[in-house]
Amino acid sequence: MDTLCVVPTRATTRGDDRTPLAGSYDVLICGASFAGLAVARELAGSGADVLIVDRYEIGERQTSACGIPTEWLHRTGLIGAERQRFDSLLIHTPHGERRYRLPWTFSTFDYRELCALLWDQCDARFETAKVNGRAAPANGDGAIAVDTDRGVLSAPLVVDALGWRRVLASGDGYQPPDAPLSRGLEVHPGGSSEELEMIWIDRRYVPAGYGWSFPARDELRIGVGSFDPRFHVRDTTELLAEDLGSERVRYQGNWIPHKLRRATEGGVFFAGDSAGHCLPLTAEGIRTALYFGVALGHELRGVYEGGQDRERAAARYAEFNDSHEWKFRWMLRMQRLVPRIPPRLLGPLIRLLGNRRFVAWSFNHYLAIAPPPATAPSPQPVRVTV
Ligand SMILES: Cc1cc2nc3c(=O)[nH]c(=O)nc-3n(C[C@H](O)[C@H](O)[C@H](O)COP(=O)(O)OP(=O)(O)OC[C@H]3O[C@@H](n4cnc5c(N)ncnc54)[C@H](O)[C@@H]3O)c2cc1C
């Protein structure tokens, strides 16, 4: 990444402190954020030997503004990580603003706490390791080998939940600025606000995209997302923070995929940003990472428990993924349309669309793209430490 100047504090061991690691597992999950942990959670209690690896400790490095529909936190047993809840959305344009009363609430949460709660629902093992890519398979048993900075790991079932880079794919040159990626950057100043979540559609901050301020109890998450990867968001993220009288501290940013990709490739399963599961227009990718992660975990469980083979699981997961393609395509159409609306029409349009019935209808459809699971989680598995 070129401009997004993220300097994470590392709790993970480095260099010689990283001991060698090699071995075979039933399932290898690469990436321990939303998608990876959701897959591991679905495998809990299956008896499968699951290893999950990430270059950072679980929850060490926040990857987003951490906003999600509240019901997702309830239904996944993660409500303990909630920081603040909103029942409306305040949209600003240069020619007026409008508060949208939402038909459901939206929450901000603490990333570290949410990951810890998700991890409590898993019985997998975890190791810090940087994934470099695929390795040549050691023998002809059909296992997939993965090269890491600590050695080669292999498993018949391998998940890439490593984010937009899709490290375990063939390498098709999918790189910014030519790939369908948005970019987002935010600052995390201290402070609190009772003011509900705010969105800015204002070309002063970004020609195509939006700015936001998400209060999270004792912290604000102020940022700018650009649908155009060529637009550098650093200056205008700072401008928005300045306009809001907030400090420009604790930067966090990344590329954000805005196009669905293949769910499986070369025997590897992809979930979350690695499969382009982030929604276009809103750049909401947490609940979709959880949603597709849960679906994938379910299919992999079927393989481990003997109900289906890997190819069948791949076909079923790919079909599930592809069945959402038209919804992502519609969101992408909206993403392309909004920046074309003349600024002077934005204010009246935002007011017109703020009609209570229309907001309820559109937001309920939006939630239905990746609805929360029907049931709350079963009792937590007991992790056996050796
Ligand atoms: C500024 C910003 C704000 C956002 N705000 C929101 C929001 O409020 N709500 C929302 O729904 N979405 C938001 N998003 C989008 C959301 O962050 C992503 O869609 C979501 O994090 C995807 O989850 P994931 O598990 O697929 O990937 P990630 O959360 O990106 O996790 C990938 C994991 O893989 C690890 N990893 C990566 N490469 C390697 C490697 N080579 N070896 C080992 N480990 C590796 C990383 O350390 C990380 O733990 C935001 C995005 C940005 C950039």
Image (spheres, rainbow, N blue to C red):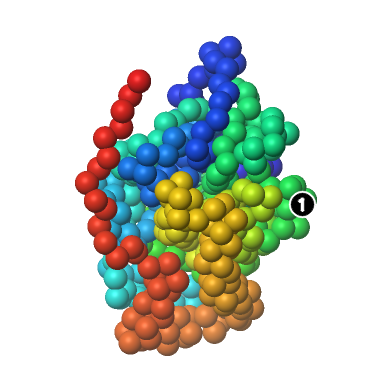
- In the rendered view, tell whether residue 92 sits above or below residue 354: above
Q: Residue at x 47, y 85 (%)?
A: 348
- For residue 122, side relative to residue 150 (left or right): left
Quadrant of the rendering where the C terminus is positioned: top left
Q: Which residue is at the front of the view, 347 or 330?
A: 330
* Residue 19 seen in this snapshot: yes
Q: Which residue is at the front of the view, 84 or 126?
A: 126
Q: Residue at x 50, y 56 (%)?
A: 308
On the image, the x and y values in percent for residue 380 come to 25, 42
Q: Which residue is at the front of the view, 61 or 96?
A: 61
Can you tell which quarter of the image residue 366 is in?
A: bottom left
From the image, tell me which residue sits under label 1: 172
Badge 1: how crowded within 10 Å, few (<14), some, or many (20+)? few
Q: Which residue is at the front of the view, 257 or 317?
A: 317
- For residue 299, side relative to residue 335 (left or right): left
Q: Residue at x 56, y 67 (%)?
A: 319
On the image, the x and y values in percent for residue 150 come to 60, 22
On the image, the x and y values in percent for residue 282 come to 50, 66
* Residue 220 seen in this snapshot: no
Type of the residue with mark 1: Asp
Quadrant of the rendering where the N terminus is positioned: top right
Q: Residue furthest top?
A: 16
- In the rendered view, tell whether residue 351 sits above or below residue 212: below
Q: Residue at x 33, y 43 (%)?
A: 45
Q: Residue furthest left?
A: 379
Respond yes or no on whether mark 1 lies under 8 Å from ligand 1.
no
Q: How many marks?
A: 1
On the image, the x and y values in percent for residue 204 come to 58, 64
Please tell me whether mark 1 sits on a helix, a strand or a loop.
loop
Can you tell which quarter of the image residue 385 is in?
A: top left
- In the rendered view, tell whether residue 264 sits above or below residue 323: above
